[in-house]
Amino acid sequence: MICPYCGYKSHVVNSRSHSKQDAVWRRRECIKCLSIWTTDEKYELSTTHRVFEDKTSDFEPFQRDKLFVSILDSLRHRKRRTQEAGAITDTIINKILHDRTAIIKTTKIQELTYKTLRLFDPTAAAVYNATHFN
């Protein structure tokens, strides 16, 4: 990584994994100007993971927004649906990342989402079930 101050190369001084998500905290130092800064590095799921659609046998990049919108729609009866949908989306993504596979079937995403919603809000799970499991 290049230094944000002088544009020269940097090296990692310290590195730690985040406990709740697959991300890495790194302390970096510029080789030239000796500036120190911190980065949080996360997977870019649209480039690292592919979704396999069983019905069409197609692959497409993983899209967090698509998952978020489907959860948000299921939580439309709740007052804090946007914040809750974001937290549930992050929970499901963490479960997907812990499987350590780059190809995810849509049915796996649907099952994880349904099970997570069922624990959080049975009504939301029923709405999700009605729209995604035909």
Image (tube, grey):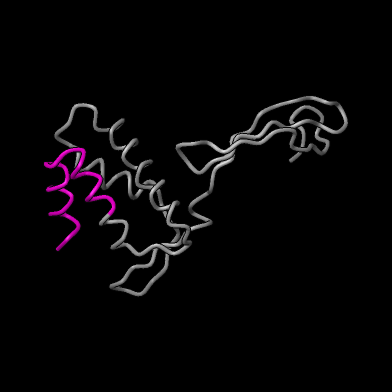
Quadrant the N terminus occupies: top right
- Which residues make up the magenta segment? 112-134
Image vertical order of residue 122 relative to residue 57, above or below: above
* Direction from residue 50 to residue 108 in the image, left or right: left
Quarter occupied by residue 4: top right
Residue at the location (33% across, 49% down)? 67
Q: Residue extending furthest right?
A: 32
Asked if the magenta segment contains residue 23, the reply would be no
Residue 96, given in percent of the width and then of the height, sits at 40, 53
Residue at the location (34% across, 50% down)? 66
Q: For this rendering, which residue is in front, 94 or 16? A: 16
Quarter occupied by residue 132: bottom left
* Direction from residue 123 to residue 72 in the image, left or right: right
Quadrant the C terminus occupies: bottom left
Residue at the location (46% across, 61% down)? 101
Image vertical order of residue 112 relative to residue 78, above or below: below
Residue 30, given in percent of the width and then of the height, sits at 81, 31
Image vertical order of residue 10 relative to residue 33, above or below: below
Asked if the magenta segment contains residue 124, the reply would be yes
Residue 131, given in percent of the width and then of the height, sits at 16, 54
Q: For this rendering, which residue is in front, 15 or 47? A: 15
Residue 104, given in percent of the width and then of the height, sits at 39, 62
- The number of numbered badges drawn on the structure is 0
Residue at the location (12% across, 54% down)? 130
* Direction from residue 93 to residue 110 in the image, left or right: left
Q: Main secondary structure of the magenta part?
A: helix
